[in-house]
Image (tube, grey):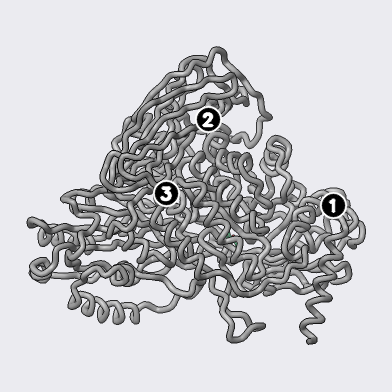
Amino acid sequence: MKKHLLYLLLLSCAALSAQKNTQELIDELTLDEKIYFLIGTGMEVPGLPEDSKPAMAVVGATKNEVAGAAGTSYAVPRLAIPAVVFADGPAGIRISPQRDTNPGQTFYATAFPTASSLSSTWNTGLAAQVGEAFGIEGRDYGVDFLLAPALNIHRNPLGGRNFEYYSEDPVLGGMITAGFVNGVQATGLGATIKHFVANNSETNRTALNTVVSERALREIYLRGFKIALDHSDPWAVMSSYNKINGTYASENEELLTQLLREEWGYQGFVMTDWFAGTDAVAQVKAGNDLLMPGTGAQFKALKAAVEAGELDEAIIDRNLTAILNTYQKTFAFKGYEPSGITDLEGHKAIARQAATEGMVLLKNEKESLPLVTGRKVALFGSASYETIAGGTGSGDVNKAYSISVLEGLKAANVKLDEQLLSDYEIYMKAERAKIPPKALFFLKDELVPEKSFSAAELNKLAETNDVAVFTLGRTSGEFQDRAEADDFLLTETEKELLTNLKRAFSGPGKSLVVVLNIGGVIETEFLKETADAILLAWQPGQEGGNAIADVLTGTVNPSGKLPVTFPVQLADVASSKNFPGSVLDPDAEKPANPLQGVPSEEIYEEGIYVGYRYFDSFEVPVSYPFGYGLSYTSFAYADLKVTETAEGVQLQFSITNTGKTAGKEIAQVYVAAPQTGLEKPAKELKAFAKTDLLNPAESETVTLTINRGDLASYDDEAHAWILEAGDYTFNIAASVTDLKLQTTVNQPEKVLRKTKALLTPKVSIPVFSKN
Ligand code: BGC
């Protein structure tokens, strides 16, 4: 009864606060309260120095409102202003499954496939469906803001958080982001697009100066954010840890005010990444409205600056207005009472569908896949038994379970070699027991090393099995980039096992199928020579094993395509030359605060030549090209019709399923601009579409419109977008290297659109050019 009354009271209080408009609320706040609103209520991280500790909770302690959530805002009971809760992340709602307040109840969230997997679907509608499921879980568990999606660029295969990001291409990344944000926010949960901008490496991330040209920023790193803002309305933006051309993103007025607000018209608010930047006053002045997770040192610095006349209260009010205008839309401000129970059952199906649709079939020879019913499978690889659902750090999810490949194949009634299973079971248990628990949650998970087999053992297994399925696993997470040895490259044990498996399973009717359970790009040349079939499953979330079984058995026809290029070797990637930057002073001491890095610099010498833009323009061979992916069926492209207007170009064409199995196709439009004036990539993705499930002989008409303005390139010297006059070739393609239909559209005159000179590098960056 008491609880009921309290609830009614809270509800009416919250509703009351919502009735007041932002200005009325601001008028009633004291200076201290205003400052508390600009910082979160803090986060206790063991081992952090004094200045990282939360501010005194004089206004109302709201920490741990939702156990395990990354952050909370202050509540002002006097004014009935409730706390607002922020929770990660890109693969599901990251909160603690237990709450002291609700003993016996669990709050597990669904672990959806990781971002790279979602972007491999090239399905913006599916991204919206997944986003909606995130929204429902957040709403039901008491969260107001999702700290996702993350859309930094896969600049280099070794990026430790690439699994959390969508693509090497901003059009694909931006459009998937928009779909996802629209889905999340349809439920009333706020989405936060992050990390703005150019947080493409993890090494020394909090002390890293990213040196990058205006052109590369505008065409690559900012572009996805701009597309996301054009096609959705995310409530918040999270600035990134790194500096951009000398100034921290969170302290960067050109980035957060002149570009984001003034040029792009953004109306929401900006928060820092957790503990980012060093100067709270500069952050507030720059338009970084909210400092997260909030520290006592920041409160003191802001108050002292106001008192000393160095920080105008009007600036504080400006930031508060952006924050409170958005908070007014939240569940908390609307007095919504979360149920604590969510549709985990329903979301299993969405997680499974998204995971299957994000899988990319890289190779399929000897009719290895789909597995014919009755074929007997010998299941190899630690990741078949402990399948990796997602990466670590803030992108992790506290899920109720995770289905392994073994469990998925069993549930699909695939005939498995039982002796091998029980050998693995014993091995995995013994090896797992040797691995100590992680000291800190954000450290990389340690995987069980591969079990080795003698050639004789494998030959014996090949006598009684038809197919060897080997799952190869990789994981990564925050604070650390990946390594080339034993991570991008296969380990010696993996190579030996694969070589022997190939030998053993090479006879008639035998196959070796490799499943890649990875978060980022690895070397595939060796694999290609060894395996008969390769399925890139990514880190497919908690339903991973079931989803892998769906694709291996043919219950679902794979329809994913690569959102990133797989190079022949790491050194072929243009950014490998300077990734992940270099330490400025090799003798510098490591800071006492474990979250702070050593001052470093990363020069983006490759400029706009990121991913396929480089390989395609410089004619460097790749292992698997951007946009590539096989199907169990085939498609034909035909009937291209072009309609030109002054604003844009409309392309219409048909896609027909010419094979024997129902399937979906992803069509991509790559435009080659005239090479007059600025040098340009050979061609660039400008639009894409995924068909519905097409039955054999069924066709779909695809219509895509591309604005002429989106064909422009950015000129660093003129500080302008330039749409060159001349012929633009539109290639409708199945991948960046598999061009199907072509048309040329003429742009009669050059168009120049001036911008302010923003984020200009302070040093000259060597020119990276084809000429
Ligand atoms: C990450 C963010 C995340 C935040 C809160 C940071 O370490 O970079 O992506 O949202 O933590 O958990």
Front one among 383 and 186: 186
Rendering quadrant holding ligand 1: bottom right
> Disc 3 versus disc 2: distance between alpha carbons?
22 Å
Quadrant in the picture for the C terminus = top left
In the drawing, does residue 297 fall left or right of residue 310? left
Q: Secondary structure at mark 3?
A: helix
Residue 417 locus on image (x, y percent): 18, 73
Total marks in image: 3
Please tell me which residue is depicted at 57% across the width and 22% down the height of the picture.
Answer: 722
Q: Indicate whether 665 appears above or below 724.
A: below
Residue 454 locus on image (x, y percent): 12, 69
> Disc 2 versus disc 1: distance between alpha carbons?
42 Å
Q: Indicate whether 365 appears above or below 410.
A: above
Residue type at mark 1 is: Asp
Quadrant in the picture for the N terminus = bottom right
Identify the disc placed on residue 120.
3
Q: Secondary structure at mark 1?
A: helix
Please identify, in this view, whether the residue under mark 3 or under mark 2 is nearer the observer: 2
In the drawing, does residue 418 fall left or right of residue 396? left
Mark 2 highlights which residue?
A: 705
Please tell me which residue is depicted at 79% across the width and 63% down the height of the picture.
Answer: 36
CA neighbours of label 2 inside 10 A, class few (<14), some (14 to 19), many (20+)? some
> Of marks 3 and 2, which one's residue comes earlier in the chain?
3
Front one among 676 and 106: 106
Residue type at mark 2 is: Thr
Please tell me which residue is depicted at 64% across the width and 47% down the height of the picture.
Answer: 249
Mark 1 highlights which residue?
A: 317
In the drawing, does residue 526 fall left or right of residue 739? left
CA neighbours of label 3 inside 10 A, class few (<14), some (14 to 19), many (20+)? many
Q: Secondary structure at mark 2?
A: strand
Residue 695 locus on image (x, y percent): 34, 45
> Of marks 1 and 3, which one's residue comes earlier in the chain?
3
